[in-house]
Image: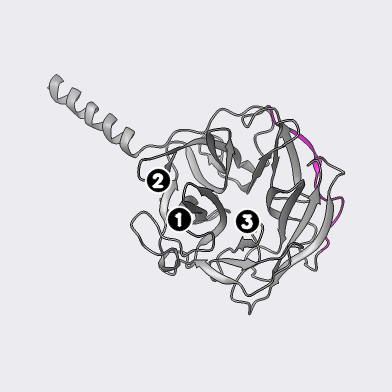
Amino acid sequence: MRSLLTLFFLVLATVTLCNGYANPLPCSGTCGNTHDPTAIRRASDGRFYRFATGGRIPIFSATSIQGPWQQLGTVLNGNAKVNSPGANDAWAPDVHLVGNTYVLFYACSQFGSPASVIGYATSSTLDPGSWTDHGQVIASTTSSGFNAIDANLVNPTTLGFGSFFGGLYQVPIGSNYQPTGSAYRVAYNSTSGSGDSVEGMYTFQYGGYWYMTFSSGQCCNIPAKKPPAGGEYKIMMCRSQSATGPFVDRNGRSCTSAGGSVLLESHGNIYGPGGQGVLQVGNTWYLYYHYMDTNVGLGDGQVLWGVNIMNWGSDGWPTV
């Protein structure tokens, strides 16, 4: 009997190692208030900056990606300079360094509506008081076929965006970040339990490929309407040899035909990871995201800052 039990636990440990995910790295300071985070390392001194959904877009800073995080202020001084009933509550920021200028995209909308708008602000330092709001980049209506939120600057000439309502899109942009052509779809999942439940893309380049990560599943309102296991947020990925697609998953399935391989999903007490981004520091690649801790609570206001080191396999796909 003892030998059988020993064999059972050895098999169980092997399965856990093969199918498990690493827990988030320890975080210190203000690790909450971090729905749909975006992060960057300042070029001048190496400090880390984190931004998140809510109000005027909170700014956090730390000496390490793990903290100690401290809130410094906000990006916007008032309502966003866009025509939206949600202009007082900016969502899903996305920050990048373009030349010598930091560019942050944001979105304004109302929950469950495709009538949305993406705007942008610029800064030379990332600090509060240094940001200039330039207003609208692209907007959507109930008849647009897409939802203009969750922006992601793929490269200086391509902006990604989208949430439910038709899936994920890209649009060509000029040096003033205004569209120079029509939007086109790069991801869609009509077979998911929640319809086209993909949103929040983040695209980056590694080797000869462009990797598009995105969130799929239910992000919010979990205590009131908890989905079946596996129906909550998870982080998916596809890749392409071109920044503009077409993107496919590990199995070669098109991302516009319900393709997508899981990069990170719920495990242990880690629930609903999503709203992700990727940050390279030296030779280390970090996947950052928000998640809920089942030991703490599943409320929208209880999301936490999560960071995992991302490793690269011999097949060219990342794991965490």
Q: Is residue 76 magenta?
A: yes
Left or right position of 171 against 259: right
Sort mark 2 into few (<14), some (14-19) or many (20+) by Cα contacts within 10 Å.
Answer: few
Q: CA distance from mark 1 to mark 3?
A: 15 Å
Q: Are marks 1 and 3 in contact (CB under 8 Å)?
A: no
Distance from disc 3 to disc 2, alpha carbons, whole Å, reads: 21 Å
Asked whether the residues under the numbered discs 2 and 1 touch, taking CB atoms below 8 Å apart as contact, a structural biologist would say: yes
Q: Look at the numbered discs 3 and 2 and tell me whether their residues touch, using CB distance below 8 Å.
A: no
Can residue 285 be seen at all in this image of the molecule? Answer: yes
Q: Which residue is mark 2?
A: 316
**Does residue 34 show up?**
no
Give the side of residue 63 with respect to residue 223, left or right: right
Q: Amino acid at mark 2?
A: Gly
Q: Which residue is mark 1?
A: 239
Q: Position of residue 49 (x, y in %)?
A: 71, 38
The secondary element bearing badge 2 is classed as loop
Magenta region? 68-81
At label 3, counting other C-alpha atoms closer than 10 Å, the crowd grade (few under 14, some 14-19, many 20 or more) is some
Element assignment for label 3: strand
Q: Residues within 10 Å of mark 1 (few under 14, many from 20)?
A: many
Q: In the image, which disc is placed on residue 155? A: 3
